[in-house]
Image (spheres, grey):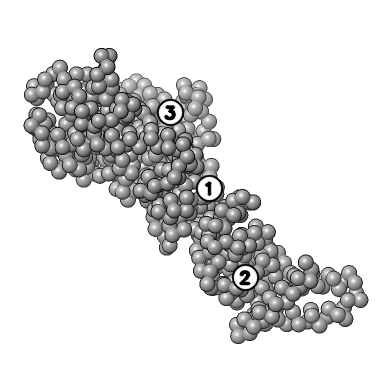
C-alpha cells in the first residue's frame, strides 16, 4: 500500500480529473469533488496528499481513486499499482476483477496498433489511405490520432488478437456469430481510436469509405459511423473523444470546444485550436459536463447552427449553474461542419470560435434573424417569440438585459415588453427544472471563506512586535489557534526547526494537541494520519490539511508565542488558586512573580529564548504535579 502510494505521481493522477497549477510548493486547482469558481483544492506532491479548503475533502492517491472512480479500497490500490507497474499480492476477488478489465485494455491497445499498422502499410489499406489523403489527412495526422484501417475480411483482427470469446465481446472488438464463428465488429472502416483522458485506448469509432472508394460494399455494411458499445472499460455518456490530446490546451486556455464528430476534432487541431473534443455517438449530457467543468470554465459548442439551436435550453442552463461553466455557441454557417470549413476557410472557423456568443444570445438572434422586422406587426410578433426564449433563462437580471436588446431591435418600449416577459415567466417554463429564479446565481459554496483561507493558510502567527501589550482576552483564543496551527505546520514541513521545543501542553486546542501527539509518535506524516484515522478522523483531516499548507512564520517566534500563551493560561490558573485559598499566597507569590517576569522577558528578543526555556521547564513540572 505504502509502496503503491509512493510510486504514484499524485499530481499527474489528479491532473487527469482537474486542472492543477503550481503555487509555491503546492499545486492548486478547482476541486473535483465540489463545484466552485475559485480554486480551493490543494495538493502536496511530495507527501502525496490533498485537501480542499472548500468541502474539506482530503486524502491520498488511494482515496482519490476510490472517490473519483467509485471503486472500493482494494480496487483503488490495484488500479494505482497498475499505473505504476507494481505487482501486488491480491486476494481472489481482486484477482478476478483484474482478470476482467486488464485483458480488455490490452486487447484494445493491441487492436489499435493492429489497425494503425494496416492503414500505414498494408496493401488493402490503399483505398483508405487515398480517401484520407483526399480529405487532407497526411501521415502526420494519421500518426497523431493513431487512425487505423479495419480490413474488409470477417476475422482479421480476431485471428491476430487470439483472446478469449469473453474478452472479444466485452471489449466490443468482435463477437461470436450464430454459427459459432468469431467475427470482427469493425470491417471495411477507417478507425478512430478513442482514449480515456490518461491516453489509454478504450473504444473505437469507425467510418465506412464513401461508395466507389474501391472497397467491396458488402464488407462495409451498416451506418456511416459506428462506435463501440458501452462495456466494462467504456461508457459513452462520460467519454469525450480527443480529451487526452486536448487536455493541456483546454487547461491553459480555460476553454473547450465541443463538436459533433471525430473529424471535427481533427479539423480544429488542424487550424491550431488544439482544445476540441467530441461526444461519441451520443448527445452532450450531464456526465460530460462533470468532466469538462473540471478542466475549463467556458464551453464553446461548435455544432452546425441548427443543431446548436436545438440543444435543450433548459438543460444547458442547468449545466451552466451546476458546473459553474459558461456555454457559448460558435455560429457556423448553416449546413457547414467544422471539417468542411477547416478545408475551405480555416480563418472563418477560427473566427467562429473567437466570436462565440453566449447561448441565450445565440438563440435570440436566431429568432430575430428569421423574423420580418420591417413592419410593426412583424416586430411585435418577433419580440414576443424572442421573449419566449428569454423567459426560459432562470436569472432575472440576465433576462432583463436581454429584454433591453430585444426592445432595441424591435423598436419597442422596454417597459411594455417587461410586462409581457413577467407574464411569460409567471406562466412558467414547460420544464419545471428551470423554474425558480432564486435557485440561479452563485453556486452554494462558501466561496468567500475559502478565498480567505486560501489567502492565509500560512498566515503568520503574530510577530514579536504585535505580541506586546495589545492582546486582550478576546483575541486570545484566535491567537492560540493560529499559533497552534502554525506550530503544527512547522512540525510537518520543517520538523528540524521546532525539534524538541514543542510539548503537548503548549497546544490549548484539543484537536491540535491530538495532531501534535500523533505526529510526535509516528515516524512519518502518513503513519500519523493512519494512526489518527482509527481514533479520530477529524485529526486525520487536520493533518492532511496541514500537509498542503506552508508555514509562513519563523519557528522561534511561533514557539515563543505558544509558550507565552500557555504561560499566561497557567498564571491565570495560579491566580485563581490563590483566590480560592488565600493561605497559599505566601507559597505561590514568588512563583507568580518569577513566571510573570519570564513572561515579560518573552517580549525582549535578546532574552526570549532563555525565558522561554525556563517557562517550558516550569510548565512541564507543573503539568507533572497536576497529573
Ligand atoms: Zn472541494
Badge 3 density bin: few <14, some 14–19, many ≥20, Cα 10 Å = some
Front of the two marks 2 and 1: 2
Residue 62 image point, x, y percent: 47, 47
Looking at the picture, tell me which residue is in the foreground, 297 or 216. Answer: 216
Looking at the picture, tell me which residue is in the foreground, 37 or 139. Answer: 139
Residue 196 image point, x, y percent: 33, 39
Residue 28 image point, x, y percent: 43, 54
Front of the two marks 3 and 2: 2
329 shown above or below 382: below
- Residue drawn at x 20%, y 24% is 155
Q: Which residue is mark 2?
A: 502
- Residue drawn at x 45%, y 55% is 48
| CB at disc 1 and ligand 1 closer than 8 Å | yes
Residue 190 makes an appearance in the image: no
Indicate which disc, 3 or 1, sits on the residue closer to the N terminus: 1
Residue 625 horizontal side relative to residue 94, left or right: right
- Residue drawn at x 76%, y 82% is 594
Front of the two marks 3 and 1: 1
- Residue drawn at x 50%, y 63% is 550
Q: Which residue is mark 3?
A: 314
Q: Classify mark 1: helix, strand or loop.
A: loop
Q: Which residue is mark 1?
A: 57
Residue 217 makes an appearance in the image: yes
Q: Classify mark 2: helix, strand or loop.
A: loop
Amino acid at each position: 500500500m505504502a509502496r503503491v502510494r509512493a510510486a504514484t505521481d499524485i499530481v499527474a493522477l489528479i491532473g487527469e480529473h482537474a486542472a492543477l497549477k503550481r503555487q509555491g510548493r503546492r499545486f492548486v486547482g478547482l476541486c473535483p469533488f465540489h463545484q466552485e469558481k475559485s480554486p480551493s483544492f490543494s495538493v502536496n506532491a511530495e507527501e502525496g496528499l490533498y485537501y480542499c479548503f472548500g468541502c474539506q475533502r482530503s486524502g491520498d492517491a488511494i482515496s482519490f481513486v476510490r472517490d473519483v472512480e467509485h471503486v472500493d479500497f482494494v480496487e483503488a490500490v490495484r488500479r494505482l499499482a497498475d499505473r505504476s507497474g507494481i505487482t501486488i499480492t491480491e486476494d481472489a476477488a481482486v484477482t478476478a476483477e483484474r482478470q476482467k478489465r486488464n485483458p480488455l485494455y490490452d486487447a484494445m491497445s493491441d487492436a489499435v496498433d493492429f489497425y494503425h499498422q494496416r492503414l500505414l502499410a498494408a496493401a488493402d489499406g490503399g483505398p483508405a489511405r487515398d480517401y484520407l489523403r483526399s480529405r487532407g489527412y497526411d501521415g502526420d495526422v494519421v500518426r497523431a490520432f493513431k487512425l487505423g484501417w479495419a480490413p474488409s475480411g470477417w476475422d482479421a483482427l480476431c485471428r491476430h488478437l487470439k483472446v478469449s470469446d469473453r474478452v472479444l465481446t466485452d471489449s466490443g472488438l468482435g463477437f461470436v456469430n450464430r454459427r459459432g464463428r468469431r467475427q470482427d465488429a469493425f470491417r471495411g472502416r477507417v478507425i478512430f481510436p478513442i482514449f480515456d483522458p490518461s491516453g489509454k485506448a478504450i473504444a473505437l469509432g469507425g467510418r465506412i469509405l464513401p461508395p466507389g472508394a474501391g472497397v467491396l460494399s458488402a464488407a462495409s455494411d451498416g451506418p456511416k459511423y459506428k462506435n463501440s458499445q458501452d462495456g466494462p472499460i467504456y461508457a459513452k455518456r462520460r467519454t469525450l473523444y480527443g480529451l487526452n490530446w486536448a487536455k493541456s490546451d483546454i487547461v491553459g486556455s480555460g476553454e473547450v470546444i465541443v463538436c459533433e464528430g471525430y473529424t471535427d476534432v481533427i479539423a480544429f487541431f488542424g487550424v491550431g485550436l488544439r482544445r476540441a473534443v467530441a461526444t461519441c455517438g451520443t448527445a452532450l449530457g450531464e456526465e460530460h459536463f462533470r468532466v469538462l467543468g473540471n478542466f475549463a470554465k467556458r464551453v464553446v459548442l461548435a455544432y452546425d447552427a441548427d443543431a446548436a439551436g436545438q440543444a435543450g435550453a433548459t438543460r444547458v442552463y442547468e449545466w451552466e449553474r451546476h458546473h459553474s461553466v459558461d456555454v457559448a455557441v460558435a455560429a457556423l454557417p448553416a449546413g457547414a461542419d467544422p471539417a468542411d470549413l477547416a478545408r475551405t476557410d480555416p480563418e472563418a472557423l477560427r473566427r467562429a470560435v473567437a466570436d462565440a456568443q453566449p447561448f441565450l444570445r445565440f438563440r435570440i438572434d436566431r429568432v430575430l434573424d428569421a423574423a420580418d422586422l420591417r413592419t410593426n406587426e412583424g416586430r411585435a410578433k418577433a419580440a414576443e417569440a424572442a421573449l419566449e426564449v428569454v423567459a426560459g433563462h432562470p436569472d432575472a437580471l440576465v433576462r432583463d438585459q436581454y429584454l433591453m436588446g430585444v426592445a432595441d431591435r424591435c423598436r419597442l418600449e422596454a417597459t411594455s415588453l417587461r410586462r409581457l416577459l413577467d407574464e411569460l415567466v409567471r406562466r412558467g417554463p414547460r420544464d419545471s427544472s428551470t423554474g425558480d429564479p432564486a435557485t440561479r446565481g452563485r453556486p452554494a459554496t462558501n466561496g468567500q471563506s475559502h478565498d480567505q483561507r486560501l489567502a492565509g493558510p500560512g498566515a503568520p502567527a503574530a510577530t514579536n512586535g504585535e505580541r506586546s501589550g495589545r492582546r486582550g482576552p478576546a483575541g486570545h483564543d484566535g491567537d492560540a489557534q493560529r499559533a497552534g496551527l502554525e506550530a503544527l505546520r512547522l512540525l510537518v514541513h520543517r520538523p528540524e526547526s521546532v525539534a524538541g521545543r514543542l510539548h503537548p501542553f503548549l497546544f490549548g486546542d484539543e484537536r491540535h494537541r491530538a495532531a501534535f501527539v500523533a505526529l510526535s509518535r509516528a515516524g512519518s506524516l502518513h503513519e500519523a494520519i493512519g494512526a489518527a484515522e482509527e481514533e479520530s478522523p477529524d485529526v486525520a483531516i487536520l493533518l492532511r490539511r496541514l500537509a498542503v499548507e506552508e508555514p509562513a512564520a519563523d519557528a522561534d517566534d511561533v514557539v515563543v508565542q505558544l509558550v507565552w500563551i500557555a504561560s499566561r493560561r497557567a498564571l491565570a490558573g495560579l491566580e485563581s488558586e490563590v483566590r480560592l485559598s488565600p493561605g497559599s499566597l505566601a507559597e505561590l507569590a514568588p512563583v507568580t512573580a518569577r513566571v510573570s517576569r519570564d513572561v515579560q522577558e518573552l517580549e525582549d528578543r535578546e532574552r526570549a529564548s532563555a525565558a522561554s526555556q525556563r517557562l517550558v521547564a516550569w510548565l512541564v513540572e507543573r503539568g507533572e504535579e497536576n497529573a
